[in-house]
Amino acid sequence: AQSVAQPEDQVNVAEGNPLTVKCTYSVSGNPYLFWYVQYPNRGLQFLLKYITGDNLVKGSYGFEAEFNKSQTSFHLKKPSALVSDSALYFCAYNFNKFYFGSGTKLNVKP
Amino acid sequence: DTAVSQTPKYLVTQMGNDKSIKCEQNLGHDTMYWYKQDSKKFLKIMFSYNNKELIINETVPNRFSPKSPDKAHLNLHINSLELGDSAVYFCASSQDPRQGNGYTFGSGTRLTVV
């Protein structure tokens, strides 16, 4: 079955440190992969997408993600975390409709 | 201007009641969706409409009935509400997700059934 998986329910990082939120995929063909962020009591907001082309994708708020075909991963990264990055992050793929991962709660502590 | 707007934002109601949630998008998108986010934050698609036609129905109880009077609106009507219906319901719209930024989401409707 096609899916995306987020192995970590929660990631804790100190402000100023680099952060990584993991996502692996199991999708046939060429996957269309996305990252979304959900702030408390808000809807999901688009961060970035990979459709084709350069494996390193840059998105909003200084986030980037690397598409790694050999490891079937699409991890979200940021070189220096901010407290305001604390939110729920969803990896997703598009195949006729969007399928979302289970979400990872990112806690950035001052 | 709000791109995808849902009303109401909060809805508290008793078991057995019938309620509706409205959604409107002003982006000119052809496709609209309803998602349910449960207490564990899992997001699950419920319905998808393309240009007023139902294209996805993900094994949702028939107490849930979406209605799309035009492609800018997708309302969700729920009959005989149950405790397990308590969740946050998100409306979303998209054109071709490969061309744009995927979905645009509304801010959610928090439904509490007591």
Image: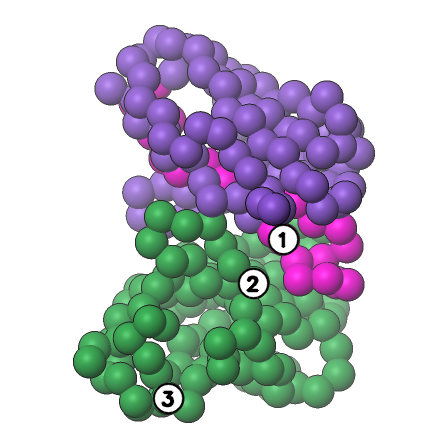
Chain colours: A green, B purple
> Is A1 situated above or below B80?
below
Q: Are circles 2 and 1 on residues that touch, CB within 8 Å?
A: yes
The chain ID associated with circle 1 is B
Q: Please, what is the three-letter code of the amino acid marked with disc 1?
A: Tyr
Residue at screen point 63% across, 71% down:
A49
> Helix, strand, or loop for circle 1?
loop
Residue tagged 2: A46
* Image: magenta residue range: B82-104
> Helix, strand, or loop for circle 3?
loop
Query: To which quarter of the image does residue B55 belong?
Result: top right
In magenta stretch: residue B35: no
| Mark 2 / mark 3, whichever is N-terminal | 2
Residue at screen point 47% across, 44% down:
B107
Relative to residue B83, is residue B71 drawn left or right?
right
Crowding around mark 3 (Cα neighbors within 10 Å: few <14, some 14 to 19, many 20+) is: some
The chain ID associated with circle 2 is A
> Is B66 situated above or below A93?
above
Residue at screen point 36% across, 72% down:
A85
Q: Residue A54's spot in the image, x, y percent?
A: 70, 87
